[in-house]
Image (cartoon, grey):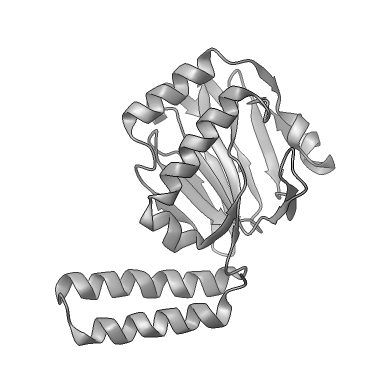
Amino acid sequence: MIVHIPNVLSQEQVAHCREVMNRAAWVDGRVTSGYQSKVVKNNRQLADTSPEARELGDMIVAALERNPLFITAALPLRVFPPLFNRYEDGESFGSHLDNSVMQIPGTPYRIRTDVSATLFLSKPDEYNGGELVVDDVYGSHAAKLPAGDMVVYPGTSLHHVNPVTRGVRLAAFFWVQSMVRDDGQRTLLFDLDMAINQVNQALPNHAGVVSLTNCYHNLLRCFAEV
């Protein structure tokens, strides 16, 4: 399931991110890659232990906690601290699969990467190329979203970032361990929750909404691992 989540950050928050990133030091993006990803990765990142990355990561996590669409789509149990990357001058990231388990830096904790997320911090007209392309059984899906918007997609997906041929592409990226590890089950719950909201808007306080909500939570009890 691929979901576009608009307005995760306000424009003021995006501007703050960019101001902080513009004065921060950047390192080779391959420092956080596995063996195979290193071969196809060509970008730069903020060091994950830098004060800039931690400040902006905390702001993003706080925004995610207030975003009902993200909660519904990802059903988060644990969120990996956001990382930040920069592409320019033809930089790209070839087709790859994210590591299935990630160690949280500076801690003994690991998370299973059920859901991958990219939060765009540059406006689409500020750069050429740079599309995030996610492959699934229905083909390839390209995302190049407004600054402050995010796309989430299954961590099991092959994906790549097209070369940036003009301007600079800035983004945050991270992973989520979901309460529901199976993407098909998460999709079922997401579709049901969206339908409940639609029925509630069309028929406010209808008794059927309570019954449907009960079904949703009983399914979540069956699927969840907490």
User: Is residue 163 visible from the viewing direction of this image?
Assistant: no
Where residue 145 sits: x, y (%)? Answer: 41, 39
Q: On the rendered image, what quadrant is the C terminus found in? A: bottom right
Residue 1 x %, y % = 51, 62
Compared to residue 123, the image places residue 89 above or below, namely: above
Q: Which residue shows up at 58% across the image and 20% down it?
A: 88
| Occupied quadrant, residue 113 | bottom right
Question: Which residue is at a point 77% across and 40% down the rendered structure image?
Answer: 37
Considering every residue shown, the one lying at the far right of the view is 35
* Whether residue 7 is situated above or below residue 97 in the rendered picture: above
Please name the residue shown 45% across and 17% down the image: 19
Residue 75 placement (x, y as % from top left): 50, 63
Viewer-proximal residue among 22 and 58: 58
Classify 34 as above or below 216: above
- Labels in figure, total: 0
- In the rendered image, residue 78, in percent from the top left (x then y), is placed at 60, 55
Indicate the quadrant where residue 176 lies.
bottom right
What residue do we see at 43% from left, 79% from top?
217
Q: Is residue 128 above or below residue 82?
A: above
Residue at the extreme front of the image, as rendered:
107
Front one among 226 and 143 = 226
Choose between 130 and 11: the one closer to the eye: 11
- Evaluate whether residue 71 shows in this view: yes
**181 displayed left or right of 127:** right
Q: Nearer the viewer, residue 17 or 141?
A: 17
Tell whether 65 sits left or right of 76. Answer: left
In-image side of 54 versus 36 (left or right) = left
